[in-house]
Image (cartoon, helix red, strand yellow):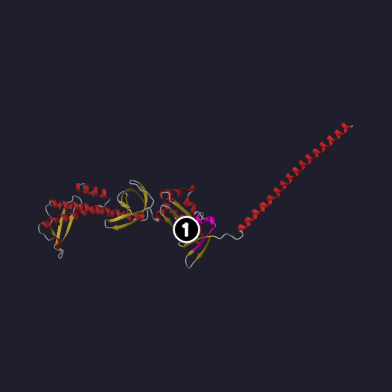
Amino acid sequence: MQTPRTEFAQALRAIASERGLEADVILDTIKQAIIAAYKRDAREAGVEVEEMDFDVELNPTNGEAKVFAWPLEKPKERKDVTPPGFGRIAAQTAKQVIHQKIREAEKGAIMDEYSGRIGALISGMILRFDGPDVRVDLGRTEGIMPKEERVPNERLNPNQRLTFLFKDIRETLKGKQLILSRGDTEFVKKLFEREVPEMSSGSVEVKAISREAGVRTKMAVSSNQSGVDPVGSCVGQKGVRVQAVTNELGGERVDIIQYTDDLASLIKAALSPAENLSVKLDEKTKIAIVKAPEDQLSLAIGKDGQNARLAAKLTGWKIEIKEAPTPKGKSTDAKTTVDKEEKEIEPASELEKVEKKEIVSDDSSKAIQTVVDDTNKKSEDKKDLAE
């Protein structure tokens, strides 16, 4: 049987559709408003309403209502106390109760809807700043990003649309609030799950991740399926996947390494881009002694110790980095090689000098011989002339 299209029924459906609530919730709200209005008028009439209990029967088709009351100690003495109408103040009270209860019911429905999305990514627009906190418009409701969940060096502007991690629903003095984050480590992981199909399907898994929000992230990944390269899947063709994550993070650098059960190898990989490292593990103190060549020492430590700090968070071990000693004989061998090269050059130089001397000597001999020949010829000419 089709419900008659009365004015009350149409209004009920319209409110339910607009607010996203069930019609029964709105009917219950109207009942509470009628009881509040009756109590207001009854108090003014001198009735002790605190010692009585009330109920309302409401027709969902035409909106007709009946009010019943009975003493708290005698529930069987239920009487129809429906008034012919309500006074102006009682009607205003009923209106306020309806608005308040509908807002509460709407907020409760929204919280129920969002409670199933905790830990997921959510899109929102920056509304305003409450001191260090940020208010975000999520559509049907608002969320808040506290100071500790923000990226320290990230600049935000009103009406800017961003992606957030929906972290939690927190009970506060102002009621329940949706807590958002962009500085949490889980935010980076969820961005990769969105960009990497192999990760969302479960064939690639994030084993460990460490982050200093806004600056750098290190992530160790492994593959659960043969033939799938975990690092290559996260990087993507020509780096398109990791670049999409980096752009969302505002240029934050992301280092992706392959996870291994060999702790020494994992620590070496975590300290990348440093190379040629040696690792010695102390199981008792959970300290890893890493020795790096002189030219790799600054890379292993990183700016202000950041690379080593993130590697320690990633592996769960304290890392001490020391300079590897120069192998014995290395400098001597180098000097010997240089000396040999110099000695090989010296004979050639001496040979050139000898050749030059020989050339000079030949020229000098020729010149002397020419002078002698000229002198002898002149003597012979004078002898002939005398004769």
Instruction: Answer left or right for 254 relative to 173.
Output: right
* Magenta segment includes 278: no
In this picture, which residue range is highlighted in magenta?
288-298
Residue 148 visible to the viewer: yes
Q: Residue furthest right?
A: 387
Instruction: Name the foreground residue: 194 vs 317.
Output: 317
Q: Residue furthest front?
A: 386
Residue lying at 28% horizontally and 54% vertically, measured from the top left: 109
Q: Image quarter for residue 77?
A: bottom left
Question: Compared to 6, does 82 lie above or below?
Answer: below
Residue lying at 71% horizontally and 46% vertically, measured from the top left: 353
Could you say where residue 30 lies in the image, as x and y percent from the top left?
20, 53
Residue 262 visible to the viewer: no
Q: Residues within 10 Å of mark 1 (few under 14, many from 20)?
A: many
Could you say where residue 383 lies in the image, as x and y percent from the top left?
87, 34
- The residue that label 1 is drawn on is 308
Q: Secondary structure at mark 1?
A: helix
Residue lying at 83% horizontally and 34% vertically, measured from the top left: 378
Which quadrant, please, contains the C terminus? top right
Q: How many marks?
A: 1
Instruction: Answer left or right for 202 relative to 337.
Output: left
Instruction: Name the foreground residue: 110 vs 344.
Output: 344
Instruction: Name the foreground residue: 45 vs 179.
Output: 179
Could you say where residue 204 lies in the image, as x and y percent from the top left?
46, 55
Q: Residue furthest left?
A: 45
Instruction: Answer left or right for 180 relative to 304.
Output: left
Could you say where residue 133 lies in the image, as x and y percent from the top left?
32, 53
The kind of residue on which mark 1 rests is: Ala
Question: Compared to 376, does 249 lie above or below?
Answer: below
